[in-house]
Image (cartoon, rainbow, N blue to C red):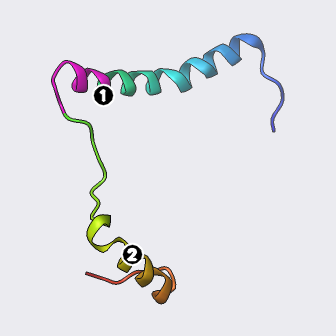
Amino acid sequence: MGSKLPPQAQRWRIIIFTLPIIGVTSFVLYKRLVLGEPRRTLPTDLDKHGHEKVADIYISGGEGKSS
């Protein structure tokens, strides 16, 4: 690691790293709560083909079957 930062520099570093995270999180929550946008979900069809896909990954060495 580098040398220890003075307290004022540590405060600025914390501000620079946290403000973008707070901003994006607030924007996503605003869209979800105020504008009514649905929550993002991962597409999955594990109920139908989940076990087959896992077997394909094991058989092909981790590359899976190309669709």
Q: Residue furthest right?
A: 3
On the rendered image, what quadrant is the N terminus found in?
top right
Picture coordinates of residue 57, whole percent (x, y): 45, 80
Give the residues drawn in magenta, as a range.
Answer: 29-37
Q: Is residue 5 above or below residue 63?
A: above
Q: What residue lies at 49% left-to-right and 79% top-to-bottom?
A: 62
Amino acid at circle 1: Val
Residue in front for this viewpoint, 22 or 37: 37
Q: Which mark is residue 28?
A: 1
Q: Is residue 30 magenta?
A: yes
Picture coordinates of residue 23 (x, y %)?
Answer: 39, 22
Q: Which residue is at the far front?
A: 47
* Mark 2: secondary structure: helix
Identify the secondary structure beneath mark 1.
Answer: helix
Residue closer to the observer: 16 or 48:
48
Drawn side of residue 62 relative to residue 64, left or right: right
Numbered circle sitting on residue 60: none
Q: Which mark is residue 51?
A: 2
The three-letter amino acid code for the residue at tag 2 is: His
